[in-house]
Amino acid sequence: DAKTTQPPSMDCAEGRAANLPCNHSTISGNEYVYWYRQIHSQGPQYIIHGLKNNETNEMASLIITEDRKSSTLILPHATLRDTAVYYCIVNTGNQFYFGTGTSLTVIP
Amino acid sequence: EAGVVQSPRYKIIEKKQPVAFWCNPISGHNTLYWYLQNLGQGPELLIRYENEEAVDDSQLPKDRFSAERLKGVDSTLKIQPAELGDSAVYLCASSSTGPPGDEQYFGPGTRLTVT
């Protein structure tokens, strides 16, 4: 199954863009990239997903490289409420593998 | 729209005792998932249901864990007997379409402590 690699932690200044990278070099052509986040003591929250094209919604933007081996989640204007663990997931259809994610801390 | 409901939110039991967790998914969601999350780790899938059928239970420790979704709506996850290593958060999620393009909605989880 495709797995992902993320930095364990990142900091971001409040109001600035947070760019969270993810490597998924073994991804297959029909496997989606998903991003979730988990705020302390809550269940994971869906953010965005994509297959090949870049995607944007009200929460974030997802940039997927042309070879699909990596992606970046962009939170355009980070707030203190965005402090959470962010998971990059490759959905193989049979397994939704979360990994350990990136702990993002937004600093005032 | 009501979210995924789980109960109880917290449970403390002694080892070798049985325990059960309940999940009510979002109305109309046919796919239901149970995950286990250990401290500092991401959630790990235990079982996935499509309506009332368990279509992926390969990660469920069947010697002590069992699950059911009798009418294709609510689901119960049971552990009998519980061991110290079962202390974790048990998460339930649901989706409308199932993999590979599904968006899963998670409940708040049940935090189990086995003493």
Image: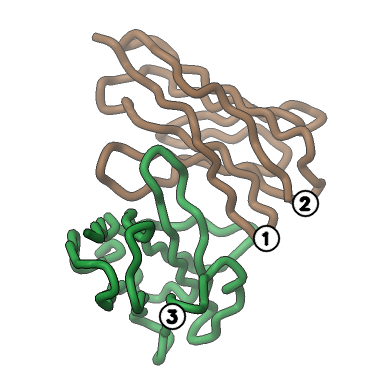
Few, some or many residues within 10 Å of mark 3 (<14, 14–19, 20+)? some
Q: Which chain is brown?
A: A
- Residue B82 picture location, percent across and down: 33, 70
Say if mark 2 contacts mark 3, CB within 8 Å: no
Q: Residue at x 40, y 76 (%)?
A: B28
**What is the total number of numbered labels drawn onto the structure image?**
3
Q: Secondary structure at mark 2?
A: loop
Mark 3 to mark 1: distance in Å?
A: 23 Å
Q: Earlier in the sequence, mark 2 or mark 1?
A: 2
For the residue marked with disc 2, what is the amino acid?
A: Asn
Instruction: Identify the residue position indicated by label 1 in the image.
Output: A93
Closest to the camera, between mark 2 and mark 1, is 1
Q: Are marks 2 and 3 on the same chain?
A: no
- Residue B38 picture location, percent across and down: 40, 48
Which numbered disc covers residue B66? 3
Closer-to-camera residue (A63/A100) = A100
Q: Does B16 sit above or below residue A3?
A: below
Q: Residue at x 50, y 72 (%)?
A: B31
Q: Secondary structure at mark 3?
A: strand
Mark 2 to mark 3: distance in Å?
A: 32 Å
